[in-house]
Amino acid sequence: MKPGPLEVGFDYSFLLPSTNDRVPSVYLDGHHVPFIAPTKYFDMYPPEKIKLVERHDDDRDDIPVHSLPDKAYQLEMSDQTKRKVMQGYYASISFMDAQVGRVIAGLKALNLEKDMIVIFMSDHGYQMGAHDLWMKYDLFEGSSHAPLIISVPGSKTKGQKSDSLVEYVDIYPTINALTVVNTPDAVMGTSLTPILKDASTKRYRYTIRKEGQKGVEFYDYESDPGEFTNLAGKKDYAEIELKMKTMLAQRRTYQH
């Protein structure tokens, strides 16, 4: 957890077919294990002030075993070690945020912010002890919820947050829609422009493993944001669960 180098890259990731203009991208690689950041970012998060995530003794009773990719040493971590891990994670994120701020400041200095769509994304989330899980090897909210920020000049929903379910395959058609470029029929994904106009929130999460042979999970984030109660198979939620199962099946067999 000592200060170290931050990997920075610059690339042209997208080619707009209508104009052959290239869309620049910047990647920052510094918030991965081992957590490395300058000392001042660690100092922002004193371990003794870090709250551990909420735990329920019976939390795992209704979770399919295949949904719990345990590592023995993680289950044995002391509270002190957990707080040190969380400190490193928070510090590296704050360090990364500062670098993103430098990029945005550069756009402003060049007077480009009013004419440029900015998309900030990462590849996955990271568990910090929820369900006694750490890192990224599960399908709970902590691992699958990755940051995604889309800044569009003139947007009426600027600064608003949405918990709507999206996929990264949606980014390409979103860019096309915002730049008035047609998306090829073979492309999977849906433009996120409706969410950019109305940042509404979705309620349920449905997860199925190997056609249900390795477990099914169904959570209601309105009443259970911590994913403590698996509603799969519950009679009162049967109609909603069937709807979610049907939607997932349609998505998996996606065709234009």
Image: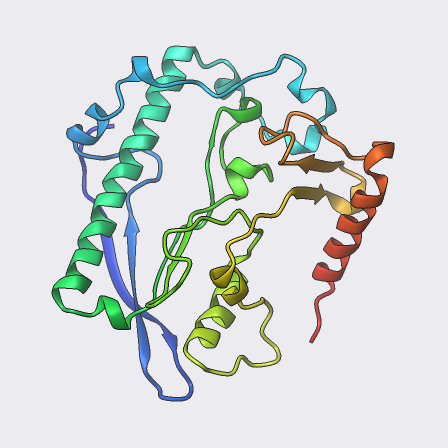
* 186 horizontally vs 49: left or right: right
Pinpoint residue 193: horizontal percent, then vertical percent. Answer: 50, 67
Q: Which residue of the protein is positioned furthest toward the left in this rendering? A: 109
* 242 horizontally vs 153: left or right: right
Pinpoint residue 55: horizontal percent, then vertical percent. Answer: 56, 17
Q: Nearer the viewer, residue 91 or 7?
A: 91
Q: How is the image coloured?
A: rainbow
Q: Nearer the viewer, residue 228 or 61?
A: 228
Q: Nearer the viewer, residue 140 or 192?
A: 192
Q: Which residue of the protein is positioned furthest toward the front in this rendering? A: 156
Q: Quadrant of residue 72?
A: top right
Q: Quadrant of residue 247?
A: bottom right
Q: Quadrant of the N terminus?
A: top left
How many discs appear? 0
Q: Residue at x 18, y 37 (%)?
A: 4
* 75 horizontally vs 82: left or right: right
Q: Which residue of the protein is positioned furthest toward the bottom in this rendering? A: 18
Q: Residue at x 16, y 29 (%)?
A: 40
Q: Quadrant of residue 58?
A: top right
Up/down of 95 relative to 24, above or below: above
Q: Which residue of the protein is positioned furthest toward the right in this rendering? A: 235
Q: Residue at x 46, y 82 (%)?
A: 181
Q: Residue at x 50, y 54 (%)?
A: 199
Q: Quadrant of the C terminus?
A: bottom right
Pinpoint residue 41: horizontal percent, then vertical percent. Answer: 21, 31
Pinpoint residue 169: horizontal percent, then vertical percent. Answer: 53, 63
